[in-house]
């Protein structure tokens, strides 16, 4: 059985980076040029509800299936992150929490308004279904999941700082510690930037 996804208006990597850098400039400008990790809780717990009117919640998402760590519901204007991530004392889990929070924040900030508009239009036509297609047929830049992960990578590891650390010869592990993300996240970010890792 193929996975079906909602198709959203396409966003280029450049546009997503522009959105991420604009948000960082507004919320935490020091994260663009200082050795500090991004404050994800401020983004998700204060900025998202204030800007979007979305209620955020940390709860048990295991009932949705294995591997579901975050979920945003446009219809009810609610966003959830799995409580096991937020409550975990393990470093790898707390770092996964950070990436999940930023990922869900992008859904709230960018996708919920789009989907709310679609829902309001479709109610006029007695059709509440969102347009979904098989994931394999969706171009990446029109996939909300691809967009949200692209945003998370740029938001948590701003390009200029990441490039600076790479040119200075910092290791993946060192960058992971500075940005407070898991090493695999750093590896993917560097690869997406066209940079080689050891």
Image (spheres, rainbow, N blue to C red):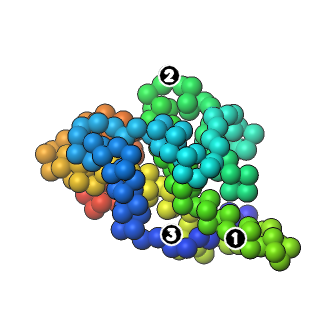
Pick the front one: 153 or 46: 46
User: Residue 145, how many percent across, how many down?
Assistant: 55, 59
Q: Label 2 vs label 3: CA separation?
A: 34 Å
Q: Earlier in the sequence, mark 2 or mark 3?
A: 2
Nearest the viewer among 152 and 121 is: 121
Looking at the image, tell me whether mark 2 or mark 1 is earlier in sequence order: 2
Relative placement, left or right, of 129 versus 47 is: right
Residue depth check, mark 2 versus mark 1: number of the one nearer the observer? 1
Q: Which secondary structure, mark 2?
A: loop
View extreme (front): residue: 50
For numbered disc 1, what is the local secondary structure?
A: helix
Residue at screen point 13% across, 45% down: 168
As helix, strand or loop, the secondary structure at mark 3 comes to helix
Extreme residue toward the bottom, this view = 125
The residue identified by callout 2 is 89
* Residue 159 found in image quarter: bottom left
Determine which residue is flagged by label 1: 118
Q: Which residue is mark 3?
A: 140
Residue 102 versus residue 74 in the image, above or below: above
Number of the front mark, 3 or 1? 1
Residue 68: percent from left, percent from top:
64, 44
| Gap in angstroms between the C-alphas marked 3 and 1 | 20 Å
Q: Residue at x 50, y 32 (%)?
A: 93
Distance CA(mark 2)–CA(mark 1): 40 Å
Q: Would residue 43 be seen by someone viewing this image from the given angle?
A: yes
Which residue is located at x 23 percent, y 40 percent?
Answer: 34
- Position of residue 101 in the picture relative to residue 26 (left or right): right
Residue 137, located in which quarter of the rendered image? bottom right
In the picture, measured across the screen, residue 150 lies left or right of residue 115, that is left
């Amino acid at each position: 059985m193929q996975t079906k996804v909602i198709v959203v208006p396409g966003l280029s990597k450049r546009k997503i980076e522009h959105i991420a850098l604009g948000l960082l400039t507004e919320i935490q400008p020091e994260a663009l040029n200082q050795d500090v990790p991004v404050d994800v809780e401020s983004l998700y717990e204060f900025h998202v509800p204030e800007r979007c009117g979305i209620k955020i919640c940390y709860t048990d998402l295991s009932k949705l299936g294995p591997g579901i760590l975050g979920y945003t519901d446009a219809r009810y204007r609610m966003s959830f992150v799995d409580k096991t991530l937020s409550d975990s004392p393990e470093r790898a889990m707390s770092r996964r929490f950070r990436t999940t929070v930023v990922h869900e924040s992008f859904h709230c900030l960018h996708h919920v308004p789009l989907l709310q508009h679609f829902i309001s239009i479709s109610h006029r036509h007695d059709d509440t279904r969102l347009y979904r297609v098989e994931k394999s047929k969706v171009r990446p830049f029109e996939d909300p999941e691809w967009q949200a992960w692209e945003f998370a990578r740029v938001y948590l590891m701003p390009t200029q700082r990441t490039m600076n650390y790479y040119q200075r010869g910092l290791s993946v592990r060192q960058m992971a510690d500075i940005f407070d993300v898991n090493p695999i996240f750093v590896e993917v970010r560097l690869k997406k930037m066209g940079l080689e890792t050891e």
